[in-house]
Structures are given as C-alpha cells and as structure tokens.
Image (spheres, rainbow, N blue to C red):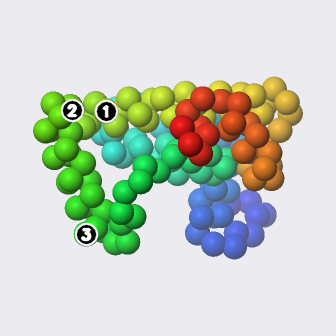
Amino acid sequence: VFGDVVASDAGALLANWDRIKQAEKGRASSLDGIPTTLPALAAAQKVVRRAAGVGLVPEVPSIAAPTDADSLGDVLLGLAAAAREAGLDAEDALRGAVARFSTAVRAVEAMAVADGLDLRNAAPDVVADYRSRTPGTSEHG
C-alpha cells in the first residue's frame, strides 16, 4: 500500500502517503484535493499538516502553547470570545487566514517546481530561502 518506503514514525508514514496520493492523482500542489467545503478549523488542520510535509508552517502567534486537548480547547474558546467582543466572525477570519497561507504555500511550491526542486527532499535552509521570498510563509509573517 505504501510502496517500498520504510517510515521511521507515523508522521513519515503519513508524508509518504500524501506523496503517493499527490503523484497518483497528478496534483501540482500538496494542498490540492482538500475540500473547500470543510469548516475552517478542519481546513486549517489539513492545510497545516500538508504544508508541514513540504517544510512550510505558518507563524504561531505568541500565546500559551496548549499541552493537551483541554488547554487547546480553552485557547480556541478564548479566541472565539475575543473575536465576538471585537465584532469579528472567527470562522470567516480563520477561513481567510487558511486561504492566504494556502496561496503562499502554492507560490513556494511553484517556485520550487520551476527550479526542479522537490521541497519534501530539500534541506531546511533551502526551504527557508524559498519561504523568505514568498509573503505569508516566512517564520515572521
């Protein structure tokens, strides 16, 4: 099912699965095939997981890092409350952030493909160079 690749952990196994599916379906981007109808939080999780597979992750704002499901839930609940107090729609805001990050990831992937590079096999400093040339993917926004 997973080819001849030996995965060192579940993350490597999942990355290999994504690589197989991307090639099998002729997808140009690691983000292709993610349904646009997903709720924003589910879409964010899929986009971040797949982007991380090619070495790209969004900046994490300064907040207390959740260490378990309860603390993550508390952070999410607090953010929803803060959005409400500011008159913002948390779902729409997250959907917009996912769309912006997805656009940036696709731009980095396109630059790498144009240069004949597979980001999944690139050294971290090479990925960082591509990130620095694409707004929305750098470690600092």
Q: Which residue is mark 1?
A: 93
Residue in the picture at 63% in, 64% down: 13
Instruction: Name the residue type under label 1.
Output: Ala
Q: Is residue 136 above or below residue 128?
A: above
Q: In the depicted view, which residue is nearer to us: 140 or 101?
A: 140
Other residues around mark 1 within 10 Å, as few (<14) / some (14–19) / many (≥20): few
Residue 63, image x, y percentages: 37, 57
Please say if the residues under marks 2 and 3 sit with CB atoms less than 8 Å apart. no
Measured in 3D between alpha carbons, the distance from the residue under mark 2 to the one under mark 3, in whole angstroms, is: 23 Å
According to the picture, the residue beneath numbered tag 3 turns out to be: 70
Q: Amino acid at mark 3?
A: Asp
Q: Secondary structure at mark 3?
A: helix
Q: Give the quadrant of the C terminus.
A: top right
Q: Position of residue 49 (x, y in %)?
A: 52, 51
Q: Amino acid at mark 2?
A: Asp
Q: Would you say 63 lies left or right of 48 here?
A: left
Residue 130 appears in view:
yes
Question: Residue 108 is drawn in which quadrant?
Answer: top right
Seen from the viewer's position, the closer of residues 15 and 107 is 107
Where residue 37 sits, quadrant-wise, is top left
Give me the C-alpha separation between circle 1 and circle 3. 23 Å
Residue of label 2: 89
Furthest-right residue in this view:
116
Locate residue 60 relative to residue 78 in the image: left or right. right
